[in-house]
């Protein structure tokens, strides 16, 4: 089946799974995560991997209890270890002054990391797919973004020194996921909140992407290819930036110094990234572009970042100084 081959190729090309890995599968009960768990169950027959299914009830919908039971049944039928946990998402959102959507995401990753540490699992698999990638890139474009936003959801990233998040379905479209679930007769739940127009991502999914597909049916695939290109370029520039910072900066609690000549001789792309990495205050484009313009000018007066930090030129040094 096509999805199985795409899944295996994606894992191999990105070195996501190795023999001996202990992998937590974050399974909500929706089609994406159920299909991901089923594909991992098939993969386990040919690889030496240890799987655990983890499900969270965010206590936001009545259907959540039913979803947890469905996921538990799925895991037990396949003899996969299962853990479920209740999360007080609304209270967490209120306490931290954030949206319920953001609170849910933060709570999931906090708890997944805690479980991974406690149970000594090194990888956490989430079911983000190609459509999620397109939606994420569009969301960042609408809000305003640089190349980090255009790279979208990373294939993998470190949560901790010994724990990584992997996205094994990122190269699979939602259509293929739903087709696989139907053919394999997998039971899954549909979250009604996915059809609510209250969330930006849903507006993109329900309104914007369908219109873009009328212009080009392959738009989702093109967004995915764009994310891979930008991610590669980001990795290259990040390496160059890190090398510059290591050789030309000194960073302490109250002072950050940069060699002015080396900085001035760098390409503009690298200059921007250097400042974004070392600046001790909010790193938006207005701040960074303002400092770049000030550095290139002949002004000797300090550049004020905020009431705590300023930037000064001193001989062959640029210095961020805390008041």
Image (tube, rainbow, N blue to C red):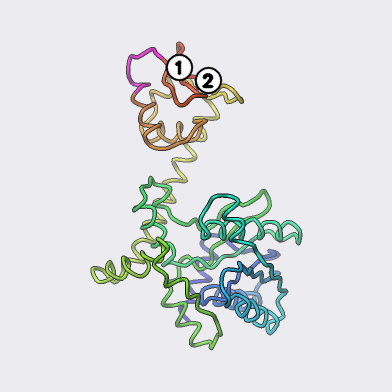
Chain part drawn in magenta: 294-301
Which residue does the image show at 49% across and 56% down from the upper left? 154
Magenta span includes 297: yes
According to the picture, the residue beneath numbered tag 2 turns out to be 321
Within-10-Å neighbours for mark 1: few <14, some 14–19, many 20+: some
Q: Are marks 1 and 2 in contact (CB under 8 Å)?
A: yes
Magenta span includes 193: no
In the rendered structure, the answer to whether residue 234 lies left or right of residue 162 reads left
Asked if 165 appears above or below 66 in the picture, the reply is above
**Element type at mark 2:** strand
Q: Position of residue 255 (x, y in %)?
A: 56, 21
**Element type at mark 1:** strand
* Majority secondary structure of magenta residues: loop
Comparing 162 with 110, the one in front is: 110
Comparing 314 with 247, the one in front is: 314
Q: Position of residue 80 (x, y in %)?
A: 70, 76
According to the picture, the residue beneath numbered tag 1 turns out to be 312
Query: What is the spatial separation of the Cα atoms under label 1 and label 2, in whole angstroms?
Result: 8 Å
Q: Position of residue 301 (x, y in %)?
A: 39, 13
Please identify the quadrant where the C terminus is shown. top right
Res 290 → quadrant: top left
Please report whichever mark, 1 or 2, sits nearer to the chain's N-terminal start.
1
Which residue does the image show at 26% across and 68% down from the upper left? 216
The label shown at residue 202 is none
In the rendered structure, the answer to whether residue 261 lies left or right of residue 36 reads left
């Amino acid at each position: 089946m096509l999805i199985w081959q795409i899944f295996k190729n994606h894992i191999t090309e990105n070195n996501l799974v190795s023999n001996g890995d202990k992998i937590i599968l974050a399974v909500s009960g929706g089609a994406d995560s159920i299909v991901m768990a089923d594909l991992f169950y098939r993969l386990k027959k040919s690889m030496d991997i240890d799987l655990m299914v983890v499900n969270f009830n965010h206590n936001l919908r009545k259907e959540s209890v039913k979803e947890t039971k469905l996921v538990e049944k799925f895991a037990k039928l396949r003899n996969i270890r299962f853990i479920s946990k209740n999360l007080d998402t609304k209270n967490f959102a209120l306490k931290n002054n954030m949206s319920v959507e953001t609170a849910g995401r933060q709570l999931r990753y906090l708890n997944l990391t805690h479980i991974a540490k406690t149970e000594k699992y090194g990888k956490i698999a989430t079911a983000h797919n190609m459509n999620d990638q397109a939606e994420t890139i569009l969301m960042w474009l609408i809000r305003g973004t640089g190349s980090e936003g255009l790279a979208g959801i990373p294939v993998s990233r470190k949560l901790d020194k010994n724990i990584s998040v992997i996205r094994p379905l990122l190269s699979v479209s939602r259509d293929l996921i739903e087709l696989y679930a139907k053919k394999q007769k997998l039971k899954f739940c549909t979250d009604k909140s996915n059809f609510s127009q209250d969330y930006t991502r849903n507006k993109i999914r329900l309104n914007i992407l369908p219109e873009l597909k009328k212009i080009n049916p392959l738009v989702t695939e093109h967004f995915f290819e764009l994310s891979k290109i930008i991610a590669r370029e980001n990795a290259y520039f990040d390496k160059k930036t890190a090398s510059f910072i290591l050789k030309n900066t000194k960073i302490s609690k109250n002072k950050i110094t940069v060699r002015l000549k080396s900085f001035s001789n760098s390409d503009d792309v690298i200059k921007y990234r250097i400042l974004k990495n070392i600046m001790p205050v909010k790193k938006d484009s207005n701040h960074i572009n303002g400092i770049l313009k000030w550095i290139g000018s002949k002004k000797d007066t300090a550049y004020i970042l905020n009431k705590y930090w300023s930037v000064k030129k001193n001989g062959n040094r640029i210095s961020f100084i805390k008041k």
